Image: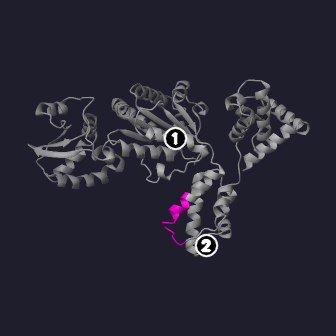
Amino acid sequence: MTKEKWGQLRQRLLKTVGQNNYTNWIEPIEFRAANDGIATFDVPTNFLGNYVSQNFADLILHELKTEDPSLRRLRFAVPAPVGAGADMQEEAVTEQRPNAPRAVKSPASNALTTAPLDKRFTFDTFVVGKPNELAHAAARRVAEGGPVTFNPLFLYGGVGLGKTHLMHAIAHELRARRPEMNVLYLSAEQFMYRFVQALRDRKMMDFKEIFRSVDVLMVDDVQFIAGKDSTQEEFFHTFNALVDQNKQIIISADRSPSEIKDLEDRVKSRLQCGLVVDLHPTDYELRLGILQSKVEQQRVNYPDLEVEAGVLEFLAHRISTNVRVLEGALTRLFAFASLVGREINMELTQDCLSDVLRASERKITVEEIQRKVSDHYNIRLSDMIGPKRLRSYARPRQVAMYLCKKMTSRSLPEIGRRFGGRDHTTVMHGVKRIEELKTQDGQIAEDLELLRRALEE
């Protein structure tokens, strides 16, 4: 048995165990030698060696016997530090030491990346604008891999605003800057799946050890654990254990911790103890910047295609709710123009993207109205939707309720719920009061017009 043969056998194991299992468990182990019927492998940690021994040893031994039938069992050992004697090496094999040295090879050998990372999602390809500049700066700071003053970093925002892009960018940067760090990136759904699997297989200690031994834990779409009591409890304990060890946690969700329904109060409290950053809906300038960036990327595949002046501005104005839809529309536009051999002009754009443009009609949300109104009157959003009845809060609250009634399809009871659980009669009174004031108070009428224009941009 030789290292070359082991390299060939690993490729057969890849087909059997799948890419994730191979990357996490098989690829990090290295064949050392085969003597007296025992095949010895070097592993970066005792935990990894124990896991492979319990879950993949029979499969590995079966493959090895096809090359050397005399092999009877496997042995996994953590290599001794450089310059250490034989006694220390043997200790590393027989004794689980929490500070056992890691073998620094490729990032895959020390990053248990359950969820695959998209190579396109890096900081270099992230277009920064006013709506996302704070989130980008915080993500950059965490990606440096050094100590930070906030833990966890909680990123939230609607669909297609860049949360996952930033999460992947952080993971890519950490793996490049600090390859020795154990970075675990996965979705909340995958965390839940692993937890249930550990319960079923009675391997909760393994589950706890793998999640509490990471240097950086990244969990995407954490809102999916809401309502799952046992999963929330384990997540809470894992969170506490990592924070106590000064390990970094990065989390994303589609809404703020306080707005995630069925999430336990103690979990909400923990999630809010770090830096909570909102990725606001994109503004026109940011959408135009994203389109210009994507056009440069498309020119690699379509170097001869020209884009008529005004097309990008038109798309940035019309497709305003979702960056993914915006990027998809541009991809379709370039492909269509290439196939029909035409320049990308306004006529072709409207023909090619007629369904996208119809579906992307401006849909204003209650949350967007609340943010615009609180910004306009320079008050905190929490005060505007909270219980305070001071005039400085009550009037902006009524203005926001009025705009919600006029500019959205939400019912009065639903609008009331979005304003701190108020009754629909309160909303009705607020709307009626603003109707009266806009004919009597020029300032209110001007505010309403400014806010309406800002929301319709």
- Look at the picture and state if 389 lies above or below 173: above
Total numbered circles: 2
In this view, 328 is above or below 28: below
What is the basis of the colouring in this image?
one colour
The picture places residue 17, in percent across and down from the top left corner, at 32, 49
Residue 308 location, x and y as percent? 64, 68
Q: Give the residue at the far left of this rendering.
A: 36
Q: Residues within 10 Å of mark 1 (few under 14, many from 20)?
A: few
Q: Identify the residue under disc 1.
A: 137
Say the numbered circle drawn on residue 343: 2
Q: Which quarter of the figure has residue 32?
A: top left
Q: Is 396 rendered above or below residue 457?
A: above
Range of magenta residues: 293-304
- Mark 2 residue type: Glu
Residue 102, label in figure: none
The residue drawn where x is 47% and y is 42% is: 140
Q: CA distance from mark 1 to mark 2?
A: 38 Å
